[in-house]
Amino acid sequence: PVVCLHTKEDIMLRTTVSRLLRRNAGTNNAILGLGSIKRRNISTEEQMKLEQEINATFAEAREEIEAAMESVGTTYFNDDAEIAKELTRDCVAKYEELLTKCEGDAGRKEKIQRSMGLKIEQLKAECNLIDTAHDD
């Protein structure tokens, strides 16, 4: 089996680059005047790809939240907590992107909300526990 190991620096770099690309994509669309173009419905393939990305990021974020909670009181806590928070923000952003792309299809959007909404809320709640963990 292939084992894929990511260092914390790799994860932080990847999420930072991803965030910058998303931020700049919106700016470029505004500059090019593309913001007012009516969105087309998302393809099934694109939806599946986004859902897979969300699920992968969700799993990574959960692992990092667990690592942060295990490292409370150690020198690793701040780094672990920041990585967990960044991955959580990335996961939530991807989920919101998916919902936005499905705005033209209320049934599809509701199905996604039913299948993924609770776990996204759970992830946000678990991430919020990090902020209080170092106070214990």
Image: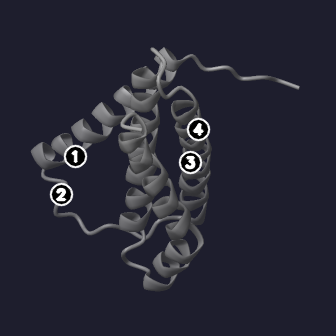
Please report whichever mark, 2 or 4, sits nearer to the chain's N-terminal start: 2
Under mark 3, the amino acid is Phe
Quarter of the figure that contains the C terminus:
top left
Percent position of residue 116, x then y = 55, 66
Q: Look at mark 4 in the image and give the residue it sits on.
A: 66
Residue 117 vs 53, above or below: the answer is below
Q: In the rendered structure, are the residues bearing label 2 and label 3 in contact, judged by CB atoms less than 8 Å apart?
A: no
What residue occupies the far front of the structure in this picture?
136
Q: Look at mark 2 in the image and give the residue it sits on.
A: 35
Under mark 1, the amino acid is Gly
Q: Nearer the viewer, mark 1 or mark 4?
A: 4
Q: Residues within 10 Å of mark 2 (few under 14, many from 20)?
A: few
Distance (Cα) linking label 1 and label 4: 33 Å
Under mark 2, the amino acid is Gly
Relative to 109, is 60 on the left or the right? right
Q: Does the image show residue 56? A: yes
Q: At 82% across and 23% down in the image, what residue appears? A: 2
Q: At 36% across and 74% down in the image, what residue appears? A: 103
Q: Look at mark 3 in the image and give the residue it sits on.
A: 58
Quadrant location of residue 101? bottom left
Q: Residues within 10 Å of mark 4 (few under 14, many from 20)?
A: some
Percent position of residue 130, x then y = 42, 41
Q: In the rendered structure, are the residues bearing label 1 and label 2 in contact, judged by CB atoms less than 8 Å apart?
A: yes
Please report whichever mark, 4 or 3, sits nearer to the chain's N-terminal start: 3
Under mark 4, the amino acid is Glu
Please report whichever mark, 1 or 3, sits nearer to the chain's N-terminal start: 1
Q: Look at mark 1 in the image and give the residue it sits on.
A: 26
Residue 62 vs 47, above or below: the answer is above
Q: Nearer the viewer, mark 1 or mark 2?
A: 1
